[in-house]
Structures are given as structure tokens and as C-alpha cells.
Amino acid sequence: MLDLLLRDVRALTMRADHPRAHTVGVVGGVIVGVDDEVRDLPARAVVDGGGATLTPGFTDAHNHMVWYGLSLAELDLSTCRSLDEVYDAVAARAAELPSDAWVVGSGYDDYVLGRHPERAALERAGGGRPVWLKHRSAHMCVASDAVLDKAGVLDGSARVPDGGVVERDADGEPTGLLAEQAQQLVDALVKPYPVEELAAAVARAAEVYVREGLTHVTEAGIAGGWIGHSPAEAAAYQLARQRGELPLRVELMPATEVLHPFDPAVGVETGLDLGLRSGFGDDFLRIGPMKIFTDGALSSRTAAVTEPFVGAGGLGVLGDDPDVLRERMLAAHRSGWRIAAHAIGDRAIDLTLDTLEQAQKELPRPDVRHRIEHSAMVRPEHLSRMAALDVVPVPQARFLYEIGDTIHSALGADRMPWVYRQRSLLDAGLRVPGSSDRPCVGTGAPLAGMRSMVERTTKAGLVLAESERVDATEALHAYTTHAAYACHQEDRRGRIGPGMQADLVLLGDDPTTVDSTEIDGIDVLATFVAGRAVHGADTLTWTTGGPTS
């Protein structure tokens, strides 16, 4: 007997041999057949889809789940359109807090505001309380005098980490802006977060994710560096899962800072305690690649580029000494890790590709699928090198809409064809997964990401590299089959067919046939993980059984 039968659906199976289906059967959280294979079988629970569109569950191949969950409890500055609005919001939040409490906000955009908030104004708005505001890119933050004083920035006692920038004015005074690794100066004052607080953040984020059709996400950096929140961050995911508050599958990327060397006699060069590495865990929670930052971001002009940024110039910054970055990646490769290298600027991509080529030459690991997170400035000659290495580029198409105008002003028109490519990566034979980098930009909803892959428009209406557009079916593949490939799990998810995990999304319309302007407005009617409705169960038409049967 089937556990679940979905009938009267228009299933986009993402399979070449059976591209459409109308009935799907599930046993033990796994799809056992479609159409004639299951149509007449008895089932404990039957859902009548009413002709709605069914797709494989969506995957976000690069997000920051804890960070997003924390931001949901922080002061939201994403709607502020002037500095006065920011200061007023800070003052209003400060008035609700004790005199020694921190005012923490996130999502401000200096491109919209005209410039970054100023430390003295934040000091006044916060009434002397520590004020810490995170830029929407997550690669910068601003802090008030109270924070900068605690961090040793004002008296010059702070040691700025390699790859970090403390902005100073013409007189050499700190402005309050901290970029890249310099954010650790503030992090050290508030971290580590208690595991209980992080587990609550995971639960908050998960509730949003399943409403958007996400059934699997990759958490792009935990436990160390400026990206991590606690050395026990993985425990927060375990706790949320134990409580039944993690309804989707998660792959965790440990930050490179938490990998450590072993005695040579052990036979493992670098890794986590107990020798854990990529692949440890199960289909609901497991360790993925190690995450390493090779540079910064385009919006902060800290990405490592080969030609200066427009206007203020500069070539950005690498995440550390290039020899250090190279050796960390090589050691990880030799120790059996998959590598996820954050590389945005073309100079950082050069360094990453050079290192991966060296790694494969010294110790070939066929089908390892190392990743280049963001792959934001891919020059034409990078394409063949990526293909030869079978790396997985992980660009964020939604960035084109959210910060595309900022990127255009930073790089100029001539370099726009390199930015967040899609079509040329596919044409080179690469799999390109969909991802958001949430909460670094606006919405992280997969359907919004698909729309941006198809349109490539900015908020101001510019079309960035029209030749890099893909059609809606290819965009859907990005969030299903390609995302599964990026995680070495294409054998069990990303398609609708026998043996695949029953991770499914029921949609109010077909994203491959509606006008592109309507894709992100499609209703997510229900989300299933392992055959269980984790969103929308109460609104489904159950002809037999039900959500609690």
C-alpha cells in the first residue's frame, strides 16, 4: 500500500524519459512510481491536486540559514530610503531597550541611502547604546562609538585581521565602517551565540523556507571566521531537528577556520575532530564542503579584481595572503574534502582555478565537484578551465535585480557580460545550481531567483548581459536537478521518478509557461519533504487520510 498518492497534478518531472506525469505514488518517503505505475494502487492518504503544477522540491545551494533566522528578530533596515529613516529606526528601537542593550539592525543599502550611516549619528540615535548595523551584502557593517571603543578601534589597539578593512576619513579617524574580515572585531564582542538562540533562528528560517517551496538548503559557512556564529553551530541544527523544528534537509559547510591539522601518523592532513569531512551525516543533515573566502564583494568594492573599480578605483582585497589561501585549499583537497571557494572578482577566480588545477594534478580526485561560490566575474577564458575541472559555479541571479545597478556602477558596462553568467556556463557543459545567498540581498525565494535568470533586469530596468538569459525550464533545472548535482545527490533528488526522495512542491501555476513577470507571484500551495506535507497540509484536498493520518 502507498503511504501517499498525489493525483490530478501536472507534474514537471525533470526527466527526459517521462517529462510529464499526473499521478505520483510515495512509500517510506520515496517516490515509487508515476502514472500507470501507481494509479490504481491503494493508499493511506490521497491528495487531489486539482490540476495544480507539481515540481521537485526546490534547493537553495547557497544560503545562510542561521544568519537569516537571526535577522528576522533584528531591526529590518531594508526598506529605509534615507539616512534619517535609518537613524529614526535606530532611535525607536533603542527607546524600547535597556540602557546597556545592543541595537542590532540589518539590511541597509548605502547605494539607496547615498552613503553609509555615520558612527556619531548612530551614537546619538542609540542614546549611547552599542549600535551595530549590518550591510545587506553582509560584507560590511557600521558601528557606533560604543561598539568601536569596546573593539579597540578608536584607540588603535585593535589588530585588524588580514583581509579586513577599517575605513578612515581624511584625518585618519575611523568612520565606523568595517569591511570583510574586520567585522570580526565586532563579532568578538557578541559571539559565540548560545546554541538555544541559534536553534530558534534555524526554526524561524525553516518556517519561511518551506512556505517558499524549499526542501533542501546548503548553509554556506558555519562555526568559524566572521561567517560563523558558534564553534558548536552544527549542534543548533541537531537541536532544531530533535525538536521537530527542522522540516527540510540541510547541508552544512564548515568554515575553513575550524579545520585543523592532524598528526601525520593519523593519515588525515586536515579536518574536523574525529576526522569528520564532507559527506558525514544523513539525507536530512550532513557535512558538505569546507567554505573558504578568497575575496570580498562587488557592492563593497572589496572583490579581488584584475582591473580597478570605476570611480574610486582599487583592486579589492583577497581574503588572506594568497599562499595561505592556496595551502588551505590544497590541504583540504588532499584530506578528502570538497571545496567551496567564495570567489567573486576575476582575480579571486584566477587564484581559485589555479589552485584547483594544482590540486587535481598533485592528487587526482575524479568527480569531486569542487565549487566556486558566486563566480561573479567569469571572464571568457575561465569557462573552459571550469569545464575541464568540472567545478560547480554557484552564481546568484537575483543579485542582478537586487544590486545590479550598484554592480554596474562599480564595474562599468564593459565588464557586465562577465557578471553572474548563466547561459555561457551551461553552454560550457557546467551544471549551475540556483541559490540566493540569503539574507545578503532581498528576497531569497526560489521563484524570484528563477525570474531573474530569465530576465536579468535590475531594479532600474537595465538588462545586464541579455545573452546570458536562460528559459524558464532551464531556471527550474537550476533549483532542482542542477542543485542536486552540486551536492552529489542527483541519484536521489531533483527529479520526480522511482527511487527519488518524495520532496515536492505544489504550485498554483506552471513557472515554465507563464509570462516571466508572473513567475515570482506563483502561489506555493504545498511543500512535501519525504512525502510529508510540511507546508499547506490544511489547505490540500485529502480524499483519503489527511495531514495527520
Image (cartoon, grey):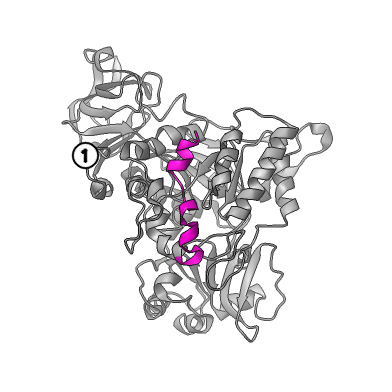
Q: Is residue 389 magenta?
A: no
**Main secondary structure found in the magenta portion:** helix
Identify the image quadrant of the N terminus.
top left
Q: Quadrant of residue 177?
A: bottom right
SS state under label 1:
loop
Of the residues shown, which amino acid type is indicated by label 1?
Asp
Q: Which residue is mark 1?
A: 509
In the orientation shown, which residue stands out farthest toward the bottom? 171
Front residue of 70 and 297: 297
Q: Is residue 510 above or below residue 128?
A: above
**Residue 301 percent coordinates (x, y):** 55, 65
The magenta-colored residue range is 409-430
In the orientation shown, which residue stands out farthest toward the right? 265
Q: Is residue 422 magenta?
A: yes
**Circle 1 Cα neighbour tier, 10 Å, few/some/many (<14 / 14–19 / ≥20):** many
Q: In this rendering, does residue 274 appear at all? A: no
Left or right: residue 93 versus residue 4 is: right
Left or right: residue 459 versus residue 488 is: left
Q: Is residue 272 above or below residue 103?
A: above
